[in-house]
């Protein structure tokens, strides 16, 4: 869904990453699910939010 070879998808990708992170922030009634959500948030933060170059690329490309 987020990888398009013949058309640009960077805006959609940034939108989906934000939505996934928002979903993971909400707690569930299942502790195992909450652990997975916390791990996913940590991974998203590492690769998309803590990497300044990656975040800048997403933000710049998304604004054009």
Image (spheres, rainbow, N blue to C red):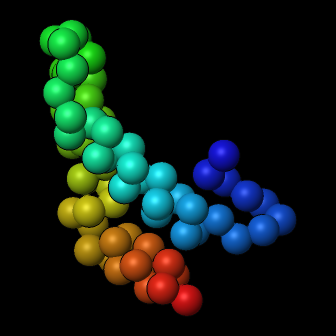
User: In this view, which residue lies farthest toward the bottom?
Assistant: 64
- The image shows residue 1, relative to residue 24, as above or below, that is below
Q: Is residue 25 above or below residue 45?
A: above
Q: Residue at x 31, y 39 (%)?
A: 23
Quadrant of the rendered structure where residue 49 is?
bottom left
Q: Residue at x 27, y 36 (%)?
A: 24
Q: Is residue 16 left or right of residue 56?
A: right
Res 39 visible: no
Residue 3 image offset from top left, x and y in percent: 67, 53
Q: Given the current orientation, which residue lies at the most extreme right position?
A: 6
Q: Position of residue 51 (x, y in %)?
A: 27, 66
In this rendering, the count of numbered labels is: 0
Whether residue 14 is visible, yes or no, is yes
Residue 39, image x and y in percent? 23, 32
Residue 6 position (above or below residue 27): below
Residue at 50% x, 78% y: name it: 62
Taking 8 as reference, is 13 left or right? left
Between residue 5 and residue 21, name the one nearer to us. Answer: 21
Residue occupying image coordinates x 62% and y 51%: 2
Displayed quadrant of residue 52: bottom left
Residue 16 position, x and y percent, is: 48, 52
Of residues 46 and 41, the one drawn nearer to the viewer in this rendering: 41
For the C terminus, the quadrant is bottom right
């Amino acid at each position: 869904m987020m990888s398009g070879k013949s058309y640009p998808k960077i805006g959609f990708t940034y939108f989906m990453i934000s939505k996934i992170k928002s979903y993971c922030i909400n707690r569930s009634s299942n502790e195992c699910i909450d652990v997975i959500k916390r791990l996913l948030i940590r991974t998203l933060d590492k690769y998309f939010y803590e990497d300044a170059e990656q975040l800048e690329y997403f933000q710049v490309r998304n604004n054009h």
